[in-house]
Image: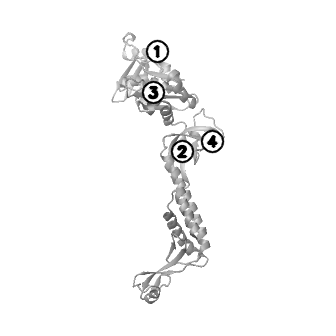
Amino acid sequence: MSTEFIEALNEIEKEKGISKDILLEAIEAALISSYKRNFNTAQNVRVDINRFTGVIKVYARKTVVEEVLDPRLEISVEASREINPHYHLEDIAEIEVTPRDFGRIAAQTAKQVVTQRIREAERGLIYNAFIDKEEDIVNGIVQRQDVRNLFIDLGKVEAVLPLTELMPTDKFKHGDRVKSFITKVENTTKGPQIFLSRTHPGLLKRLFELEVPEIYDGVVEIRSVAREAGFRSKIAVHSRNPEVDPVGSCVGQKGMRVQTIVTELKGEKIDIVRWSESVEEYVANALSPSKVIEVIVYEQEKMARVIVPDYQLSLAIGIKGQNARLAAKLTGWKIDIKSETQAEQEYGRPKSAMSTMHQDSVSID
């Protein structure tokens, strides 16, 4: 060790933000193990590195006793006072036992410790950077693929995008840029591990927050999102300012804002509906693009019975029940859809007594 070594630690402290004292303490602890291993001793020892010169000394630590039973751990009062006249019974006497060739072992050990600590510090910085981005969108580049995952280069770290978290319309190859949603960040023994998704509803929500200034500024609020990735999504929005149309803000001029999101999601259809405190109105809006005549709410069952025109029944239910299923997810209410004719037959409501409810929503294909 030398003054150059101490200067190198000072540089590491400046560049990497790792305290020199912490590094030296870690090196001293590692050198104790190296000393015992290389010199096959069970002595209690202390290693001291001079903070200015880098000089290393090894001291055996022995308890001062009247009668020595184990010379590796004990020293007599007389022998201890030859080292220092101020030692007394039960004191810990320190005797320098630095081997001649200990410098070579010390240099190798110090290099290993410093390298490990730098790696740990860099992993910590990456983890701290990405834990703040959990539930946010990141851009990355496809690096490789195995049978279960895509591995995405995010710059300082490689993230995992499970194939199960890809949309059916996603087709990526090496070098493609991918926009994904961070679902989880874990700090493992191998470093930070970041998990991504393209199917998570949070991806749709964050895309709207990035694309619509009114949402970013907090004027328009996303109240709920329901998504069947790659096929269809529904998003419920509400304006805190009565003069701002939440649906129109999300759609944008000539549909430009929402179309950008549709393109990013490879053509996924998006229904933008107005959220309402009125369950009847909210459920009716959620069933867009179907027209709704009446919504009957059953509070205890948290169920809404919806009556739609006969010719709108299949549209309200959707292909394989998709529209009704997404509306139920969006609102949190069970939805039972009936046509006018079914309602007349089951509940005795004449068609003439029914009128179509006002709905506020937009569907984008």
Neighbours of disc 1 within 10 Å: few (<14), some (14-19), many (20+): few
- Could you tell me which secondary element the residue under label 1 belongs to? helix
Residue 184, above or below 314: below
Of circles 1 and 3, which is in front?
Answer: 3
Can residue 244 be seen in this snapshot? yes
State yes or no: discs 4 and 1 in contact (Cβ < 8 Å): no
Residue 301, above or below 64: above
Question: Where on the picture, by quarter, is residue 306?
Answer: top left
Q: Which residue is mark 4?
A: 142
Q: Tell me which label, 4 or 1, sits earlier in the chain.
A: 4
Q: Tell me which label, 2 or 3, sits earlier in the chain.
A: 2
- Could you tell me which secondary element the residue under label 4 belongs to? strand
Of the residues shown, which amino acid type is indicated by label 2?
Answer: Phe
Q: Tell me which label, 2 or 4, sits earlier in the chain.
A: 4
Residue 361's spot in the image, x, y percent? 45, 22
**The N terminus lies in quadrant:** bottom right
Q: Nearer the viewer, residue 352 or 331?
A: 331
Mark 2 vs mark 3, CA separation in Å: 29 Å
Q: Which mark is residue 195?
A: 2
**Residue at 55% over, 38% down:** 180
Q: Which residue is mark 3?
A: 327
- Could you tell me which secondary element the residue under label 2 belongs to? strand
Residue 58, above or below 204: below
Q: Nearer the viewer, residue 292 or 64?
A: 64
Q: Which residue is mark 1?
A: 310
Of circles 4 and 1, which is in front?
Answer: 4
